[in-house]
């Protein structure tokens, strides 16, 4: 270890264990709140909130008026979206603003709404698929690596995982591609590069099959898929989220099992998604229903935020040692009636990650303020690791900037490049000679569209490390 005396900004201090989260309701009387999401819908630089309501049959967003999460204005996108079940936000038509996706179980619909003027006040509806039986979940990403946003969905009664190709990049013409037509009780869908080959794979949870599965995007164009079962006996599998849980540089998975009442994570043993080892996070957790992987305490590793329907509970679990071997339970809210969905984002703009939840029995879209102390300047002695290291990017998800740290034990020529999911370079953060020490770099994505990006740091012969980040507008 190298000893150094440095003066730096301590971005996040770990004082969460005994601290209280402060509850703020954005949307009350949102009948049958089933799903929550956050994005900058109106393009003003702060995080707004979105929700899907089953009984109101509504897709709605709440404007974060002052950027601190204390004053909200409700805007209805669609109030006849029959039994709305899922909501997601991303730039679908490539015009640089935030559009909205929805899944409706009674309408059997996958739909997206165009943010016409970019301020969230005028919406144009575009049907993607009107016969997707009991549409349960929706997700947006670039599946075929052609530079635009495609849509992925899960259909509970059809037992389908499907993606729709955005043919011209404007969201007006869609081609359906079946990934799996026998995924019994398909309940939730997500996407990530599970096998580390640079393209987007699909991840799903099947409630009736009791199954967590990922599908390998074989040619990278979304036309050929190989199924790989992660957990074949995870009773009532209803949610899955991806992240590097053990800090080894590959993608692991979290899952929520409703019937078994437990939160698990699965280690991607060799990084190729072919061998998985299951590990319990929670023990019994009554009606476990939602998971979201995120660094909640700002210590550079992946924690998990969860919702339990039976326990009426929102909790985050601290990855104590950073390798997924030891978990510490931290209550956010133990009285959130019918907790069904969670998400994490910096709602109040203070630099840390807050918790978001949808309560189907509470009829609420709520956020809880993270009590983490931010922005304290200290002088202290620290031990730098002797190896070359790219530290976890924070915040992540982000909008529009995020910060990364790189340790160089010796002076070196450093290259830090940002790529989109198509492998195209979108930013050059560092190129040249850097002194030994800890270096902070900022990725400004103000001119980029929502989605996944990859930050790659290279020192020839010493380091070649990549971090995945998500820009959410």
Image (tube, helix red, strand yellow):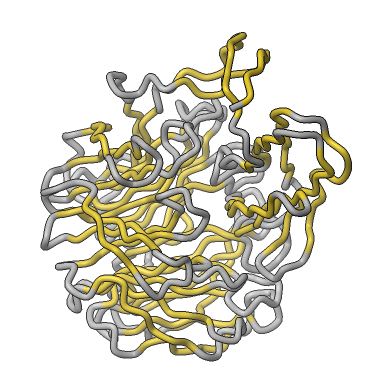
Height in image: 251 above or below 408?
below
Q: Residue at x 73, y 62 (%)?
A: 95
Which quadrant holds residue 183?
bottom left
255 left or right, relative to 115: left
Viewer-proximal residue, 154 or 331?
331
Q: Residue at x 17, y 76 (%)?
A: 208
Q: Position of residue 226 (x, y in %)?
A: 44, 86
Q: Residue at x 20, y 78 (%)?
A: 209
Viewer-proximal residue, 6 or 67?
6
Which quadrant holds residue 27?
top left
Q: Position of residue 174 (x, y in %)?
A: 58, 84
Quarter of the figure with the N terminus = top right
Q: Residue furthest right?
A: 432
Height in image: 397 above or below 58?
above
Viewer-proximal residue, 50 or 30?
50
412 left or right, relative to 120: right
Q: Position of residue 11 (x, y in %)?
A: 57, 23
Q: Residue furthest top?
A: 379
Q: Residue at x 69, y 50 (%)?
A: 463
316 left or right, relative to 371: left
Q: Position of residue 412 (x, y in %)?
A: 81, 40
Height in image: 404 above or below 223?
above
């Amino acid at each position: 270890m190298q000893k150094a005396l440095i003066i730096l900004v301590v971005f996040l201090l770990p004082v969460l264990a005994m601290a209280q989260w402060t509850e703020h309701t954005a949307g009350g009387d949102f009948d049958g709140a089933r799903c929550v999401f956050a994005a900058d819908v109106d393009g003003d630089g702060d995080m707004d909130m979105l929700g899907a309501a089953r009984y109101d049959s509504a897709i709605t967003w709440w404007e974060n008026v002052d950027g601190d999460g204390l004053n909200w204005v409700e805007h209805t996108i669609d109030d006849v979206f029959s039994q709305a079940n899922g909501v997601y936000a991303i730039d679908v038509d490539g015009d640089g603003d935030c559009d909205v996706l929805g899944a409706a179980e009674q309408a059997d619909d996958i739909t997206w709404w165009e943010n016409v003027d970019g301020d969230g006040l005028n919406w144009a509806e575009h049907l993607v698929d009107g016969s997707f039986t009991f549409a349960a979940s929706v997700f947006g990403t670039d599946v075929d690596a052609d530079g635009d946003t495609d849509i992925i969905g899960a259909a509970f009664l059809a037992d389908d995982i499907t993606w729709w190709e955005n043919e011209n990049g404007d969201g007006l013409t869609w081609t359906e591609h079946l990934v799996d037509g026998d995924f019994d009780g398909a309940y939730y869908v997500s996407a990530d590069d599970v096998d580390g080959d640079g393209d987007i794979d699909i991840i799903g949870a099947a409630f009736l099959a009791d199954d967590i599965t990922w599908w390998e995007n074989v040619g990278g164009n979304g036309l050929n898929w190989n199924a790989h079962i992660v957990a074949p006996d995870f009773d009532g599998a209803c949610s899955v989220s991806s992240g590097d849980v053990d800090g080894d540089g590959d993608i692991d998975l979290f899952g929520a099992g409703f019937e078994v009442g437990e939160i698990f994570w699965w280690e991607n043993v060799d990084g190729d998604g072919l061998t998985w080892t299951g590990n319990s996070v929670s023990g019994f957790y009554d009606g476990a229903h939602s998971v979201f992987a995120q660094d909640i305490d700002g210590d550079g590793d992946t924690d998990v935020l969860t919702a339990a329907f039976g326990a009426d509970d929102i909790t985050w679990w601290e990855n104590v040692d950073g390798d997924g071997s030891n978990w510490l339970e931290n209550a956010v809210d133990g009285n959130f009636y019918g907790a069904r969905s969670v998400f994490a984002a910096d709602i109040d703009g203070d630099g840390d990650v807050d918790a978001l939840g949808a309560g189907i029995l509470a009829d609420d879209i709520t956020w809880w303020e993270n009590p983490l102390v931010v922005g304290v300047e200290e002088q202290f002695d620290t031990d730098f690791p002797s190896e070359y290291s790219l530290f976890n990017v924070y915040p992540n998800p982000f909008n529009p900037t995020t910060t990364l740290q790189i340790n160089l034990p010796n002076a070196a020529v450093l290259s830090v490049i940002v790529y989109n999911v198509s492998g195209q370079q979108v930013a050059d953060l560092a190129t040249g000679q850097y002194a030994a020490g800890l270096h902070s770099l900022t990725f400004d994505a103000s001119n980029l569209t929502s989605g996944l990006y990859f930050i790659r740091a290279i020192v020839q012969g010493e380091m070649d490390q990549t971090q995945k980040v998500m820009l959410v507008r």
